[in-house]
Amino acid sequence: MAAKPDLSRDAYDMRIWVMDLGSGKPIYVSHGPSDVKAAWSPSGRYLAYQRIDVAKQSSELRLVDIEKGVDMGIARLGAPAVALTWLNEDTLVATVPTKLYEEEPGVKIIRSWPVWFDGRGFYP
């Protein structure tokens, strides 16, 4: 990702670029202005990223087919995702924050839950 200040919007202009290792030249992938959180598929054929709509506090998930040079929208999210993770070549997971409850005084809220992988599965 490349980010540069955009003084006219009082924000950063963020775009996704990749580098051609053979030529050393950067290759433009997205046109911004708020493209973030790029994640490669396991084979390297697809690049997923999200385009943030700051005014609406939402985002659009986008997918680039590197072999075909096609960039397409695949989903609209009510809130920007905090992470994009590929499970396999066909499955992309977007972690989106939600608030499903009202916090009550005196109630402890678990905000994170560390897990470990032992080679066979995940454990809290």
Image (cartoon, grey):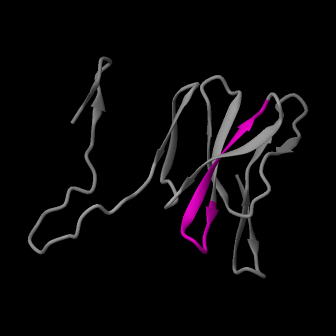
Q: Position of residue 119 (x, y in %)?
A: 32, 18
Which residue does the image show at 79% across and 46% down from the upper left? 29
Residue 34 higher or lower than 86, as above or below:
below
Q: Residue furthest left?
A: 106
67 sits left or right of 56 in the view: right
Residue 111 higher or lower than 25, as above or below:
below
Q: Position of residue 30 (x, y in %)?
A: 77, 51
Q: Any magenta on residue 44? A: no
70 sits left or right of 77 in the view: right
Q: Quadrant of the C terminus?
A: top left
Q: Any magenta on residue 57? A: yes
Residue 26 higher or lower than 59, as above or below:
above
Residue 92 higher or lower than 54, as above or below:
above
67 sits left or right of 39 in the view: right
Specify start and end residues of the magenta stretch as a single range: 52-66
* Front-lying residue, 72 or 69: 72
Indicate the quadrant where residue 110 lies: bottom left
Q: Position of residue 115 (x, y in %)?
A: 27, 37
Which residue does the image show at 40% across and 57% down from the upper left? 97
* Front-lying residue, 3 or 72: 72
Q: Position of residue 45 (x, y in %)?
A: 71, 27
The rendered magenta stretch, by its main secondary structure, is classed as: strand
Indicate the quadrant where residue 60 lies: bottom right
